[in-house]
Image (cartoon, rainbow, N blue to C red):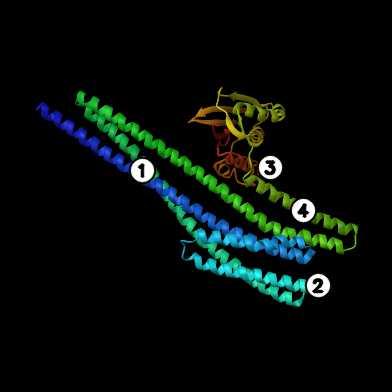
């Protein structure tokens, strides 16, 4: 009888662990499959973004050619035609890239062929207009006006078709992004299910092995093994989730850069025309005090707009780095030295919890110093005089060098935290909103990562993770 009871308990143990093993195996298979699908969808989203970006470049190249043509008509300087003459070659190269990217899209291919014909027609119109202009002793003739109207209609058709192409690609991107979100949620469900399996397994083990001491010891060993496997799976899922968040941040930063370049093209072209027209008018109109004031006002504000565009582009573009191996603790001390006058002025207390003998990191010292200094200055400005505590921690974590810069300032709400790296977003009265955008750009260009944590009334923390040299 006792043997029969023990056998039944042993059978329950076997079936219990067999069921748990199957569930964990299914969980692992589903996790692996979902991860591959996420990576696949991310690749497709990136591909769609490249198509949209290529269309933007194509439009920009055509607009540059037209702007150079107009500049020549106004100034009559052959140097303006250099960009116009280079345009067909650049446009042909961009079309080859665009056709390659959309080779698997039977809907977009005919539209792209139509777009190529329209752009070729537009360039022919510009060429004919240039010939007429030169043959007419560099004077705008009535015949050119006719070509100009045709060119406008062609350009409108090109813009409409480009918008249609981009709309199609944006729809594809939305669908693929939604797919990524669905898969991410599915991975979360699998994680929860895995944890539930672990809890059920642990409860089953305890309740069963209480009836038989010998069987309990064997089952404990197996349960520990399963727990270790589950912990590995959970860590893998956490790592994957972190990578997804970083991917989204990089995509958002790339989209910001693309938008910045688009704005630069869209604004600088008319800005160039304004400057050219201003200089032309200045040479034609007799000098007068009030007229000079107006001309100077136009020039000054035009230069200001150009500077704003340059600042935005510089904060989002990739930069060439001069890498050197350096101790991160020394680098932080260098940044603190640059901010020492502000620290002394507000009587800020600085706490440095450095881990000694950290491996050196490979960075551009000047650029990283700018990034650290931006974060430190923001922290100082967020704290009250005589009450501020600036804490800087360095440590080795997961074979990476981690820097944590924290303050006890006013902190940020969740909405501000989500927008903190966006261009021109600032909570300061006189801030430009480009400091942290530039900081993020520098960190990402070093293949490092930056995360911000904050809570209203409790301060903020910036966590930067570097790979060792």
Q: Which residue is mark 2?
A: 137
Q: What crowding class fits label 1: few (fewer than 14 Cα within 10 Å), some (14-19), or many (20 or more)?
A: many
Q: Left or right: 181 with respect to 437?
A: left
Tell me which numbered mark, 1 or 4, is placed earlier along the sequence.
1
Percent of width and height locating residue 119? 61, 68
Tell me which numbered mark, 1 or 2, is placed earlier along the sequence.
2
* Cα–Cα span, label 3 and label 2: 52 Å
Numbered label attached to residue 301: 4
Percent of width and height locating residue 359? 55, 27
Asked whether residue 59 appears in the rendered view, the answer is no
Residue 454 lies in quadrant:
top right
Q: What crowding class fits label 4: few (fewer than 14 Cα within 10 Å), some (14-19), or many (20 or more)?
A: few
* Cα–Cα span, label 3 and label 1: 44 Å
- In the image, 139 versus 454, the foreground residue is 139
Disc 4, SS: helix
The answer to whether residue 248 is above or below residue 168 is: above
Disc 3, SS: loop
Tell me which numbered mark, 4 or 2, is placed earlier along the sequence.
2
């Amino acid at each position: 009888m006792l043997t029969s009871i023990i056998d039944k308990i042993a059978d329950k143990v076997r079936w219990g662990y067999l069921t748990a093993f199957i569930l964990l195996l299914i969980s692992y298979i589903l996790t692996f499959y979902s991860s591959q699908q996420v990576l696949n969808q991310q690749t497709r989203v990136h591909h769609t973004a490249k198509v949209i970006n290529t269309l933007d470049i194509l439009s920009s190249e055509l607009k540059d050619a037209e702007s150079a043509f107009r500049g020549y008509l106004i100034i009559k300087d052959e140097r303006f035609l250099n960009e116009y003459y280079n345009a067909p070659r650049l446009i042909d190269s961009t079309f080859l890239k665009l056709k390659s990217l959309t080779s698997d899209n039977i809907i977009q291919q005919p539209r792209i062929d139509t777009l190529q014909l329209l752009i070729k027609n537009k360039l022919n119109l510009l060429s004919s207009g240039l010939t007429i202009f030169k043959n007419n002793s560099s004077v705008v003739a009535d015949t050119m006006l006719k070509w100009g109207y045709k060119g406008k209609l062609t350009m409108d058709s090109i813009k409409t078709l480009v918008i249609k192409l981009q709309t199609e690609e944006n729809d594809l991107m939305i669908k693929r992004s939604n797919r990524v979100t669905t898969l991410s949620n599915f991975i979360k469900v699998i994680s929860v299910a895995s944890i539930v399996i672990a809890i059920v397994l642990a409860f089953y083990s305890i309740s069963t092995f209480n009836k038989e001491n010998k069987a309990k010891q064997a089952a404990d060993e197996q349960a520990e093994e399963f727990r270790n496997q589950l912990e590995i799976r959970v860590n893998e899922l956490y790592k994957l989730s972190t990578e997804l968040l970083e991917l989204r941040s990089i995509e958002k930063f790339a989209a910001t850069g693309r938008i910045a370049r688009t704005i630069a093209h869209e604004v600088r072209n008319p800005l160039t025309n304004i400057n050219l027209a201003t200089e032309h008018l200045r040479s034609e109109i007799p000098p007068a005090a009030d007229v000079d004031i107006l001309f100077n006002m136009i020039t000054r504000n035009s230069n200001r707009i150009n500077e704003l565009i340059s600042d935005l582009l510089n904060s989002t573009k990739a930069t060439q780095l001069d890498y050197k191996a350096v101790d991160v603790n020394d680098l932080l001390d260098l940044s603190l030295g640059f901010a020492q006058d502000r620290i002394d002025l507000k009587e800020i207390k600085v706490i440095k919890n450095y881990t000694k003998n950290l491996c050196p990191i490979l960075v551009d010292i000047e650029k990283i110093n700018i990034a650290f200094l931006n974060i430190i200055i923001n922290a100082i400005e967020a704290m009250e005089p005589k009450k501020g505590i600036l804490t800087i921690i360095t440590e080795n974590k997961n074979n990476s060098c981690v820097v944590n810069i924290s303050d006890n300032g006013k902190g940020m709400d969740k909405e501000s935290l989500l927008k903190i790296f966006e261009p021109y977003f600032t909570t300061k009265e006189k801030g430009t909103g480009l400091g942290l955008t530039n900081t993020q750009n520098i960190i990402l260009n070093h293949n490092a990562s930056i995360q911000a944590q904050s809570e209203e009334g409790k301060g903020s923390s910036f966590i930067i993770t570097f790979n060792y040299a």
